[in-house]
Image: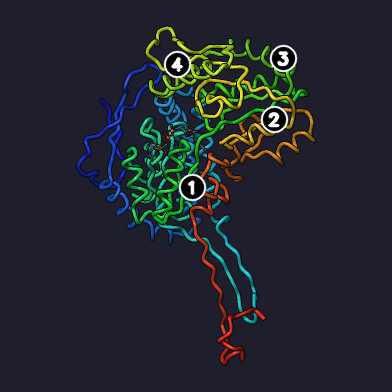
Amino acid sequence: MRTIDHFIVGDAGAPTGRTHKVWNPSTGEVQAEVPLGDAALLARAVETAKQVQPAWAATNPQRRARVMFRFKELIEANMQELAELLSSEHGKVIDDAKGDVQRGLEVIEYACGIPQVLKGEYTLGAGPGIDVYSTRQPLGIGAGITPFNFPAMIPMWMFGMAIAAGNAFILKPSERDPSVPVRLAELFLEAGAPEGLLQVVHGDKEMVDAILDHPDIAAVSFVGSSDIAHYVYRRGVAAGKRVQAMGGAKNHGIVMPDADLDMVVNDLAGAAFGSAGERCMALPVVVPVGEDTADRLREKLIPAIDALRVGVSNDPDAHYGPVVTPEHKARVEEWIDTAEGEGGEIVVDGRGFSLQGHEKGFFIGPTLIDRVTPDMKSYQEEIFGPVLQIVRARDFEEAVRLPSDHQYGNGVAIFTRNGHAAREFASRVNVGMVGINVPIPVPVAYHSFGGWKRSAFGDTNQYGTEGLKFWTKVKTVTQRWPDGGGDGSNAFVIPTMG
Ligand code: NAD
């Protein structure tokens, strides 16, 4: 059995004896195991990070950027290998796995510009002979706790920004697909980063708690499900840390009567079923406006769904592969049962799907459920599988209300040819990221990513200038260089720039 080791400097110490299975979701076989670490292991990693961070922070930003440039080249050179490794543990198809790596790489490209974005602010002559400048300084040691569904992109969102800004970084990736995060850390070292600047510790709740409680970790970025995000946020903040914690999602796609339905169906098929629906920016709810739109859309969706090819993750013709674990497959199928029990109409049923020759794989057929209503549990909660629910809205107002009132507020999309309706929707909807005729509006690396409501706890988004804000603290210096004597002002009065 292959073991996926921690990536820390020196000896990992005595193992806890606890391990986690890493599946190959296409074959249904266990392909490796990962050791689950504890507070003692974390303490070693933190000691190393404390030693290397000051010199890294003192390295001028241009030199730090050069490491990012070399890392970018290495990722590009190793793209195929990374995508295959990712796909074999996650189950997403190879091209989609390349997208996962690419979207993380784009944050590394942004981080290559760190000298520009760290320039700071300067006011010459803020008062008589007085200048003021503000700089952003690194926090020290940052940590990232990441989910299984984007094992390349999300770690790079975090460590790309944190390290470029001058921090050391400890990554605790998902124990379900931990190989790619380790491979990224190896490539980062090869790119010229000092040993120990980026370390990877494996684990589950025990390791997460150790991170949240460690006094020398200044900031924690978390992405995962909402209950855990909220827990991480509370515990981390209680320990005096800076925390950003992104949670789950239930993104809606609004379809106006004037939308180009062929385009919508094509976009929806990819956004609802791509990556087996295991994306926080998937579109698992479609909201056609008006009964006529709903009927026309449903008629076009059925053949499009029937044409989807579910296959092993390295099948180049497959639209999507298996879900990540047998437990997750069982949970998604239970949600379909729940929806049926609540009165949802199962139009296309993916339960009991079996792929010939791969009967043990964790496959679920694409599922379409109509007549879903807001009072249903299966609507309120995240399913995170290849399941598309139709919620019929009477009119535009109801279509704005549905995503706005939902507990999650990550992404939303509207499909229309009407610019006024789109503009009105985008400005009023109570959701963090909006697509207008764009089904998966993940912002580019120089903007930033973050949902609202229970999709994110904390007040800064991932990457872009928001990410930079999260991983740095502002220092403001007010200085004067008098040429002797005083200026005659009363030193007992709060200074003004009079
Ligand atoms: P998860 O919450 O199960 O796990 C996320 C991380 O938390 C993992 O590293 C895991 O080891 C750790 N963890 C698990 N149980 C824990 C516990 N009890 N206490 C402390 N830590 C624990 O999430 P997942 O299943 O890996 O990922 C899917 C979820 O992530 C979905 O809800 C999805 O919507 C969400 N997600 C959100 C975003 C976003 O940016 N909003 C992006 C991707 C995924």
Q: Give the mark nearest the N terminus, 4 or 1.
A: 1
Q: For residue 493, what is the image quadrant?
A: bottom right
> Which is more toward the observer, 394 or 180?
394
The residue at which mark 2 appears reads as: 399
**Disc 3 target residue:** 296
The first of marks 1 and 3 along the sequence is: 1
Q: Amino acid at mark 2?
A: Ala
Q: Nearer the viewer, mark 4 or mark 3?
A: 3
Q: Amino acid at mark 1?
A: Gln
The mark that comes first in sequence, 2 or 1, is 1
- Quarter placement of the N terminus: top left
Secondary structure state at the residue bearing disc 4: loop
Circle nearer the N terminus (2, 3): 3
- Asked if disc 2 is less than 8 Å from ligand 1, the answer is no
Dot 4 corresponds to which residue?
Answer: 363
Q: How much space separates mark 4 and mark 1, taking CA atoms?
A: 33 Å
- Percent x, y for residue 115? 54, 56
Q: Left of 37 or right of it: where is 180? A: right
Badge 2 vs badge 3, beta-carbon distance below 8 Å: no
Taking the spot 41% from the left edge, 19% from the top edge, the residue there is 330
Instruction: Name the front one of labels 2 and 1.
Output: 2
Q: Marks 4 and 1: CB-CB under 8 Å?
A: no
